[in-house]
Structure formats: structure tokens, C-alpha cells
Image: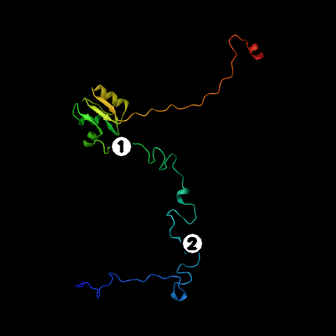
Amino acid sequence: MPEDLNLSNLKPAQARKDRKRVGRGLGSGKGRYSGRGIKGQKSRAGSHAMSPTFEGGQMPLFMRIPKLRGATSKDAMPIGPFRTYSQPVNIADLDRFDAGEDVTPESLKAKGLIRSLRKDVKLLGNGELSKKLSISVHAASASAREKVESAGGTLTLLKEPKVKKPRHRKAAAPAAAEPEADETPAEAEEA
């Protein structure tokens, strides 16, 4: 290592390498075709910027093989980015709380029963509940609600439950007009 750096002993850390000057005449060694050979795909600009799936014009593998059925695209429900997910908590997990305690998403996270406060919490009815608790969660199954109320506790929903819309069925074609009760079939035909 030099003792003092000054303008007289400055030099690059690595030896400098001149850039390749192509297309500067036959005498340069890189003239005419500029080291690319004659014609063809690899002589063209952008030939090295192909997608990894490109197979030279042959039908790519991902297009040759059969696809999985169903809604598997990134933007399809419920697989896509707008899918909803609720964190399940079973009745049996609430044994960690003391009788009369408030059970909220924050207290569930503190006890390690859920991982995130950003996702909804759904109470499920697996197990038995012997303590009186006041529970506040985003959703609950019918069996979980029964068990909480039978133990003397209260269950409050933090989110309004979704009301399922009734399916619209196409109206059946009106039946052919039937003859009135007083008329005989012969009279109905004359009318």
C-alpha cells in the first residue's frame, strides 16, 4: 500500500480494459458483421432479451400442457388478491381466559391465538366452554353462539353479518288458459 496518495501515484484499482469498438472497418477485426456472424436471429438487435418461455417459435411448454380446471387466475375469487380470509378461533381455545374477562381481537393476539389484527376473527364451535365470557369478534358460527350463551356469556359481532341475496329464478311460462269450472269442454272450444 502506498504511503501517501497524491496525483503522481494515483492509478485505478484494476487494469483498464478498452471497450470493444465494433463496425469500424475490416482492418479493426470487428468490421462488417461486428462479431455477430451472418444473418439469423442472433444477429438482430434485441435477440438476447427474449422471455424465458420463448422456445424459438415452437409452441411453448406452458401452452402445450393441459391447464388446471377452475378459477385459478390471480384475479379470480376466492383465489385472487381480493379474497377474504378470517382467522379461526375455537371455543376450546378460550380456556386460557379467566371467567368474566373480555375477549377481543387484541386480547386474542396477546394470548397468541391469532397472528394479525388486520384480518377478521371468526369464532367456531369446536370444544366446550365452561366460563362466562363477554366475547367481541367479527363473526361466529351458530354452534359457537349457542355454547357461549349456554355458558352465560355474551357474544358481540364487530361486523354486520352479510345478508345473502335470494337467487332470481326465471319466471315459469304462464300455463295455458284452463276452462272455467262452469263451462263444459265443448263450450270452452266454442269460445
Residue 144 locus on image (x, y percent): 34, 31
Query: Quadrant location of residue 148?
Result: top left
Where, by quadrant of the figure, is residue 31 drawn? bottom right
Residue nearest the viewer, comparing 101 with 95: 101
Q: Where does label 2 land, which residue?
A: 41
Q: Earlier in the sequence, mark 1 or mark 2?
A: 2
Looking at the rendered image, the disc whose residue lies closer to the viewer, 1 or 2, is 1
- Under tag 1, what secondary structure? loop
Q: Residues within 10 Å of mark 1 (few under 14, many from 20)?
A: some
Which quarter of the figure is the N terminus placed in?
Answer: bottom left
Q: Is residue 178 left or right of residue 171?
A: right
- Point out which mark residue 119 bears: 1
Residue pictured at 51% horizontal, 49% vertical: 68
Image quadrant in which the C terminus is located: top right
114 left or right, relative to 54: left
At x 57% / y 31%, what residue is drawn? 169
The spot of residue 115 in percent (x, y) is 31, 45
Left or right: 57 in relation to 77: right
User: Label for residue 176?
Assistant: none
**In what element is the residue under mark 2?**
helix
Instruction: Residue 117: give x, y in percent of width and height.
Output: 32, 43
Give the CA separation, mark 1 to mark 2: 52 Å
